[in-house]
Image: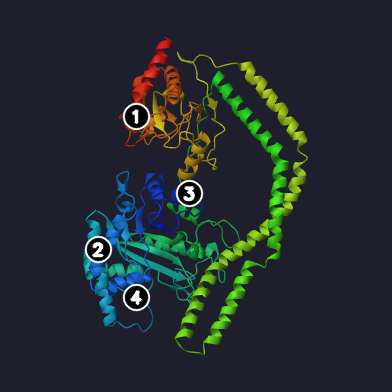
Amino acid sequence: MKNKLGFYIERTTVRFMREALEQVKPPVILIHAQDRTLLHDIRRRLSPDSFVIGRMYKELGVQEAWLDDPDPAARGREFAEEILRYDFGLATETEGGRLLIDAWMSLNEIPRGPASFPGFQVDDEYRRRAAAYDAFQVAFREQLQQEGIEAVAFNFAAGNFIKPEHYLDWFPATLENYIYLGFHEYGWPALKPGPGVQTAALFYRTCMEGIRQRYGDRHKAIITEAGLTMAYGHPGNPDEGWLNLEQPLTEEEYWDSLQWYNEEMLKDDYVMGAALFEVGHGHRWVTFRHLGEDNEGRAIQIISRIAQLGGEQPPQPPAPNPPTTPETWENLATRLSALAASVDASRTLVAGLPEQAAALQDQLEPMVAALGEAPPLLEGVESALQRLSALDAALASQSGEDVSNLRNRIESVRSDLESMKAEAKRADDVRAELLALVAAAASDAAAARSKADLLSLLDGLAADVRTLQSKIGGPPATGPVPMPKMDDLRFTLPKHPDPNVRYPNREPSLIRRIVIHHTATSSSASPFLIARGQIQRRGLPGITYHFTVGGDGTISWTEPLETETTHTNNATVNRESVGVALIGNFNDAPPDDAQLDAAAHVVAWLLGMFKSTTTDVVGRSEIEPTSSPGRQWLTGARYKDALLARVDALLSAER
């Protein structure tokens, strides 16, 4: 089975968002235009083939004013121009030769349609707005097309336009002009029709069948919003999702709807996918969430289930046994260095436990004391809602503009309080967890004071490791230039928390060149901070460089030579090269002498080790389009020449 379930992303900073994108690689993504970095990462690796739709949010009143304007086509062109100018040309920005955003939607869930409610009348007002919408849409796309950018039409509210003639009669110019047509489809408490179910699911099929009869296969359908909401066919129409607090659905119930809907979409080759509302949820839409925990604190598994729709992966052959590596000085030194670092870290942790436990207890006790005195937050929200209902009921028998305005204010506050209920419950749960934590902290503080025996054992182990290190002595000669003094951080820098996310290994005999980088950071940035940033922002297994050279000339060995890191975007180069990064940004000025001297020592040592020459030393910008290792590498100061001159001098001195 294939997957046509995609993502609607309002907030890009929701926990596990990047992991979800990489795991599912959704066919379609609708994203509120706000996160250039994530869009680049989607194109680079997270989900390069996704069809990405951008949305620039506009209030309902603004959209209505555009359709009520005497020249709606002009307003359509202006909105397209606003998108083109937004965020320094985000709409025209590319990654790997493809736009970050494939197409943009214009209006959202406007105007109201012929099937929006029983008794709806097609009157002059409706005819005027439909014609205005048709003109707005055409002008919007035509303006974007001048920059080679697509648009997505319609995106009407679920259940408003449900027959082919609703589109064919009222929006002929849009259908003539557009390729991508957007639909919203919701239901409650399921998408699949059945007893007690109200659903708009598959109205797209009814409409597209009529549209395709007239226009052939010109159009592609995208369900730009899909999901379950109590607002659809439910008394009172609360706009709450499957994790509402009053009538929550189980994950199995929700998944049954999604699985059925996916199977139906697969029957229609013109459907590109459905953006599930919301995978990247905003605060107001927390009950529609697909990431994080459910109302009971259990991890939501919907994303993992969607990822499995692609079918079972074929069994992988067992990994061959690694070749036996003879015990060399480097192997032994590496293992001892890693052991020493591990012992030191363990000793530091154990030694600090009593103080940390006591400090935690001191911090928690006043906080918990205050929380214990406060009433539950959810109880306060419920009480406020009851008081508002009573006040509204008292005003129901009165009339007048002031009374009407007050009741509207009451309804607005009521809506805000309703949206807070899920967060209030979560806050109450956190308070309960804190009360339990302070009790556990008291127990931990007592246990931490009994770690003296363990500390003594670790001290003895650390002494044994230092003795072994002194006995093996220095490294054997590996080439004409001796190994420079360096900090060995290969096994102590941060790594990705998932043990399955690791760089592949390679045979060092494959290495034949050295690639120079700059980190584009402050020259004082530490390898630790660089590694952590690359892991957190890019999801990498660890730091991408094998060596770093600090602004003060400090050399750090950051990845084993056996590790094939992704320090360039060229897999062949990564397989046969070592990445050496000079810490700093050298676009405007070159590195100073101390940093160049240290970098030259590393490079000369590596060239001797791998029997290479200075012709095998290149900057990353000589391999692929990038500014690294800085514009001063080949232009301006041309610090490549200065570096290689130092390397030649070191190699000549040792001949």
Q: Residues within 10 Å of mark 4 (few under 14, many from 20)?
A: some
Q: Which residue is mark 1?
A: 633
Q: CA distance from mark 4 to mark 2?
A: 22 Å
Distance between mark 2 and mark 3 Cα atoms: 37 Å
Q: Amino acid at mark 3?
A: Glu
Q: Residue furthest top?
A: 655
Q: Quadrant of residue 351?
A: top right
Circle 2 residue: 77
Indicate whether 398 appears above or below 405: below
Residue type of the residue flagged with mark 2: Arg
- Disc 4 to disc 1, C-alpha distance: 60 Å
Q: Which residue is mark 4?
A: 112
Q: Position of residue 148 (x, y in %)?
A: 24, 53
Label 1 sits on what residue type?
Trp
Q: Are marks 3 and 1 in contact (CB under 8 Å)?
A: no
What residue did someone put label 3 on? 19
Which one is in front, 283 or 42?
283
**Between marks 4 and 2 in the image, the one whose residue lies nearer the viewer:** 2
Choose between 198 and 294: the one closer to the eye: 294
Mark nearest the camera among 3 and 4 is 4
Q: Secondary structure at mark 3?
A: helix
Q: Amino acid at mark 4?
A: Arg
Q: Position of residue 609 (x, y in %)?
A: 45, 18
Mark 3 or 4, nearer chain start: 3
* Distance Cα–Cα, label 2 vs label 1: 44 Å
Disc 4 or disc 1, which is closer to the eye?
1
Q: Is residue 298 visible?
A: yes
Residue sitting at x 25%, y 77%: 128
How much space separates mark 3 and mark 1, taking CA atoms?
A: 36 Å
- Number of labels in the image equals 4
